[in-house]
């Protein structure tokens, strides 16, 4: 059986990468950011891409008309989460929180069989103004769609339970049109969580590039830097080292796996600003991940040591002067991020895409293996 649908706020189409295995096709995608739409098109050459603002009346009508003319089966929508995410500013009246209203309008006017709405868990606690009253987004979705759709009872899903080596909790609405008379439930579960040791533990170690000292001094700290780069290239062109300032590298060299640099007893190796002052922060920042757990949630700030649990777990070793240090004092490589997001190795990354751009779109994506499982479960109900 073949299903065809549309993707709203589609980013670069990370979540959809494995749907073709199920004979499921995205025939239309909408993305407002030009480079993301361009990236999407290079991966999905058969899909129609609307690179424009869906809040515009003519753009919205274009999407609605296309959906009706092509008798779509489903809609996937992942509105931006920065207005409600714990990693963002979490502003009460962030206009991005209202993008869900445009999604619901399209749903009501096209009435597809199935709806998949994904966002951060904080969405369940976020309110918007509707008809001059404050209402939770979840209540808004329910009130507008309850007459036409059957809702799933469970709303929070951790991607680590669906073949993804990442602790990534998400709020997910999976709606089925009432005439089909079933609830879209997920019965799949992992027998064993996939840890970082399982997923990236065999990859070659990488030293970061220290960008604020001379390369000569850099090699005094990391004499095997070039050798490790060559070893990384043999695995993937995307397994190359990120760049960090010296002060952060030295701090993380002295931070054990699973610990934050804020927990280092020696204040010399606690996070500091460029002027030497100690940084004030939370213990989930400047933090190494743990080998024996799935990876921490990948955010769009995954290039920053000082953000939430971004640092490689590292391994204990002794330096030439017999000092205990920890390897890989850096954030994860792009290749490591791909593995932890369950992105396939054959993902087509355009040559024009910058390191920062790639990292951001990965941080905002849906893990493809999880989305494949969710839609495979849907197909089971249909059959």
Image (tube, rainbow, N blue to C red):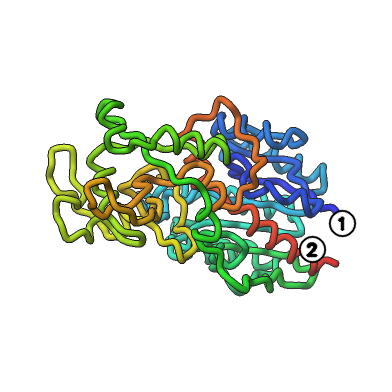
Labelled disc at residue 21 = none
Image spot of residue 3 (x, y percent): 81, 53
In this view, the residue in front, 227 or 262, is 227
Q: Are marks 2 and 1 in contact (CB under 8 Å)?
A: yes
Residue 147 position, x and y percent, is: 68, 67
- Badge 2: how crowded within 10 Å, few (<14), some, or many (20+)? some
Classify 5 as above or below 350. below
Residue 90's x, y, as percent?
Answer: 37, 53
Q: In which quadrant will I find the N terminus?
A: bottom right
Q: Nearer the viewer, residue 251 or 146?
A: 251
At x 62% / y 30%, what residue is drawn? 38
Q: Give the mark count.
A: 2
- In terms of depth relative to the viewer, which is nearer, 381 or 239? 239
350 up-or-down from 64: above or below: above
- How packed mark 1 is, by other alpha carbons closer than 10 Å (few <14, some 14-19, many 20 or more), is few
Image quadrant where residue 185 sits: bottom right
Q: Quadrant of the C terminus?
A: bottom right
- Left of 298 or right of it: where is 4? right
**Residue 168 seen:** no
**What's the residue at 46%, 66% (across, down)?**
292
Which element carries disc 1, helix, strand or loop? loop
**Secondary structure found at label 2:** helix
Residue 258 x/y as whole percent: 35, 62
Q: Earlier in the sequence, mark 2 or mark 1?
A: 1
Along the line of sight, the residue nearer the viewer: 329 or 310: 329
Label annotation for residue 379? 2
Question: Is residue 112 at least partly visible in the picture?
Answer: yes
Q: Is residue 382 left or right of residue 45?
A: right
On the picture, is 221 further left or further right than 276?
right
Question: What residue is shown with label 1?
Answer: 1
For image coordinates 29% across by 52% down, the residue present is 318
Residue at mark 2 to residue at mark 1: CA–CA distance: 8 Å
């Amino acid at each position: 059986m073949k299903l065809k649908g549309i993707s709203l706020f589609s980013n670069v189409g990370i979540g959809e990468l494995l749907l073709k295995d199920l004979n499921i096709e995205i025939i239309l995608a909408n993305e407002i950011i030009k480079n993301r739409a361009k990236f999407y098109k290079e991966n999905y050459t058969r899909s129609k891409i609307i690179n424009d603002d869906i809040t515009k009346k003519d753009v919205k009508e274009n999407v609605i008309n296309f959906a009706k003319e092509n008798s779509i089966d489903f809609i996937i929508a992942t509105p931006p989460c920065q207005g409600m995410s714990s990693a963002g500013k979490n502003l009460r009246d962030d206009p991005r929180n209202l993008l869900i209203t445009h999604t619901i309008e399209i749903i009501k006017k096209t009435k597809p069989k199935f709806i998949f709405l994904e966002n951060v868990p904080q969405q369940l606690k976020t309110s918007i103004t509707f008809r001059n009253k404050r209402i939770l987004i979840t209540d808004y979705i329910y009130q507008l769609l309850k007459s036409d759709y059957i809702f799933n009872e469970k709303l929070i899903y951790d991607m680590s339970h669906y073949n993804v080596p990442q602790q990534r909790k998400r709020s997910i609405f999976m709606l089925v049109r009432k005439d089909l008379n079933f609830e879209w439930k997920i019965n799949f579960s992992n027998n064993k969580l996939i840890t970082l040791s399982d997923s990236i533990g065999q990859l070659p170690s990488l030293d970061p590039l220290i960008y604020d000292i001379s390369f000569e001094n850099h090699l005094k700290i990391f004499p095997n830097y070039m050798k490790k780069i060559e070893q990384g290239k043999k695995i993937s062109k995307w397994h190359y080292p990120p760049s960090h300032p010296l002060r952060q590298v030295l701090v993380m060299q002295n931070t054990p796996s699973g610990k934050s640099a804020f927990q280092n007893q020696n204040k010399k190796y606690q996070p500091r600003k460029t002027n030497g002052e100690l940084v004030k922060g939370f213990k989930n920042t400047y933090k190494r991940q743990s080998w024996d757990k799935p990876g921490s949630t990948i955010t769009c700030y995954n290039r920053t040591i000082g953000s939430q649990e971004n640092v490689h777990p590292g391994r204990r070793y002794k330096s030439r002067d017999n000092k205990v240090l920890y390897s890989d004092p850096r954030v994860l490589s792009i290749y490591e991020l791909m593995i932890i997001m369950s992105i396939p190795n054959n993902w087509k990354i355009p040559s024009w895409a910058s390191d920062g751009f790639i990292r951001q779109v990965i941080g905002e994506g849906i893990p493809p293996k999880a989305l494949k499982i969710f839609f495979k479960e849907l197909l089971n109900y249909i059959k």
